[in-house]
Amino acid sequence: MNNFYSNKSYIIMQEIQIKLIEDNSKFEKVELVEPNIKHNRCDIRYGNDFELIEVRYDGKIKYISFYCTGRTAFLGLYMVEIPQYVFNRIIEFLKNKRKISHIHFINSLNYIKGAKKKMHWLLELPDNWEDYFEQFSSKHRYNIRYYKKKLEQIYNCEWKYYPQREINKKMIETFFDLKKDQKKEKAYSDLNNAEIYLESDFNKITDAYVLYINNEIKSIILYSIIDGQTAYCHNMAYDTKFSKYNIGNELYYYSIKDLIKRGIRKIYLGGGNYKYKKNSNAIKSVTYNGNIFLLNFWQKIFSCFYEPKPQKRITFVILGIKISFKL
């Protein structure tokens, strides 16, 4: 099909149907996004003003959420598996339907000019811990057992799981301290207000695993879990004084064992060149982060002056004079 036409809700080309969900059914259908994690749930991260499109192609149906502010659209495309030609049509649909000139997304499997290449790790899990554990070499299995046993022989250790209602401000403050000590100047700038960090729907922290050594938190892993089979590993930290016991890795495997028991079959681990992700048999993929301006002729002239982060305004400089206007 080479013809092209549009109406209020559809653009059809090459047997692709893209529909904007314009009624309250969007609140139910947004739960059908895949993967169902916080990055793809604009209803959770941005509230009721989120929007949702239904994409039909090749006998498949995909739901993709997005949020518009001004002419900027934040797209829920994190590890969404769609063909490149479908991705292109989605961008074109949003550009025409919502008159956007700026898009932002992370860890998309699809590319658009200007996007930056990033690696991503996905851990796929079997039905039980034994099958997962047997995937490792005998040396790796020995090391996992050895460090845990050694740690428990020397110290009083307690391994604990906390659901969302039990994750408290003090726990997050300890996480901040561990992370800052671990990362030094590379620690994230938002590690300041524990209450806001914990309550933020943007972070959507729902589960925590904690290792206590002599009654003090020495390692913590934070997860965001929205459905029963998929988890997103939000962040983790550990006391570097216990590095020789691999306490970060040990708590990581403790959490995986429990998550398998709870029915989790995929853990999205984000990016970064971390050995623990590769060593846990996570799958490495090439993804793309986009902070892209869809520029018209005049905007292209001043494109080198655009602000690098998503903004509601656009700024350029002529003869040393800064001029700013809304997108």
Image: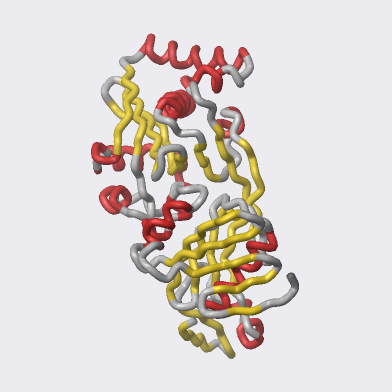
Quadrant for the N terminus in the image: bottom right
The residue nearer to you, when weighing 4 against 49, is 4
Residue 211 seen in the figure: yes
Is residue 183 toward the left or the right of residue 190 in the image?
right
The residue nearer to you, when weighing 8 against 272, is 8
Residue 210: x, y in percent? 34, 29
Relative to 26, residue 120 above or below = above
Residue 84: x, y in percent? 68, 59
Residue 103: x, y in percent? 55, 69
Q: Quarter of the image holding residue 113?
A: bottom right
Q: Quarter of the image holding residue 215?
A: top left
Q: Residue furthest top?
A: 153
The residue nearer to you, when weighing 188 against 67, is 67
The image's colour scheme reads: secondary structure
Is residue 39 toward the left or the right of residue 118 in the image?
left
Report the residue at 51% width, 50% height from top.
34
Residue 10: x, y in percent? 56, 73
Is residue 12 toward the left or the right of residue 315 in the image?
right
Report the residue at 44% width, 16% height from top.
148
Report the residue at 48% width, 85% height from top.
324
